[in-house]
Amino acid sequence: MPPESAPLVEPAAVPKPGLIKRLYDWCMAQAHTPRAVTVMNVVSFAESSFFPIPPDPLLIALCYANPKKWWRYAVWCTISSVLGGMLGYYLGVQFEPLVRKLLPMLGVSDPDAKFAMVQAFYNKWGFLALSAKSLTPIPFKIFTIASGVLHYNFGLFVAGATLGRSIRFFLVAGLIRAFGERVRPFIEKQLALVVTIFFVAVVLGFVALKFLR
């Protein structure tokens, strides 16, 4: 009798990537197209108020492809992020009850606790709180929205956001310009640490100037 054939085993179904992973993959696919700068600016703007994907990977890809334009990309990324932060501030001022309900849907747990932490940072750091946020895992959009909810001074908010975002993006772009692709894994894994160290250095510089005066 012929041997019985082994039963066919169906290959395991490959799980479908989640929404955030699909968004990330789409954003990175745009990094090598003519609209890469536009996509980076849109992502940078949206991430400051509601979007879950940070613009850093796109910024890194653009700086690696065109190292001589690193500072332009950093400028555009900073401007877009600050403008997006203004939208987040406006949402916090005008739509506080709605924002508190929507944030958990965007993956932000316990918004009230996050807002209280932002208030504590403002009490300690003043307008530098938006730069000091690099010392925390709180997303930047929480700071922008919370600033509106707390009715923090808008001018100081813009100043702090501009300082914080420019530190982050110019540091990332500058490192790529100086060291190329070999520094990319370090930036992606240790970005928060790098920005924190740089921010602390800036604060110490302010303290030293004040002391000297």
Image: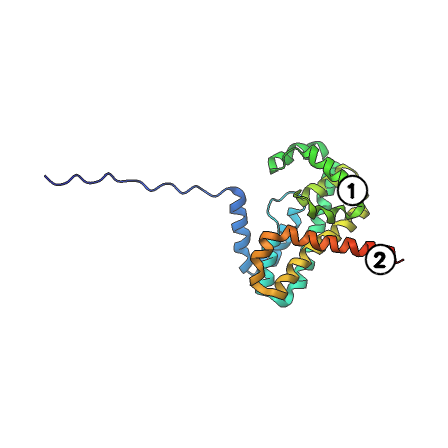
Q: CA distance from mark 1 to mark 2?
A: 22 Å
Most extreme residue toward the bottom is 68
Location of residue 105 with respect to 33 vertically, above or below? above
Task: Report whether 69 appears left or right of 24.
Answer: right
Depth order, front residue of 8/30 = 8
Most extreme residue toward the right is 213
Q: Earlier in the sequence, mark 1 or mark 2?
A: 1
Q: Amino acid at mark 1?
A: Tyr
Residue depicted at 64% across the width and 54% down the height? 41
Residue designated by label 1: 122
Depth order, front residue of 42/16 = 16
The image position of residue 196, as x and y in percent, is 69, 51
| Mark 1, secondary structure of its residue | helix
User: Which tag is nearer the camera, tag 1 or tag 2?
Assistant: 2
Most extreme residue toward the left is 1
Residue depicted at 73% across the width and 40% down the height? 118
Residue designated by label 2: 209
Depth order, front residue of 33/81 = 81
Q: Amino acid at mark 2?
A: Leu
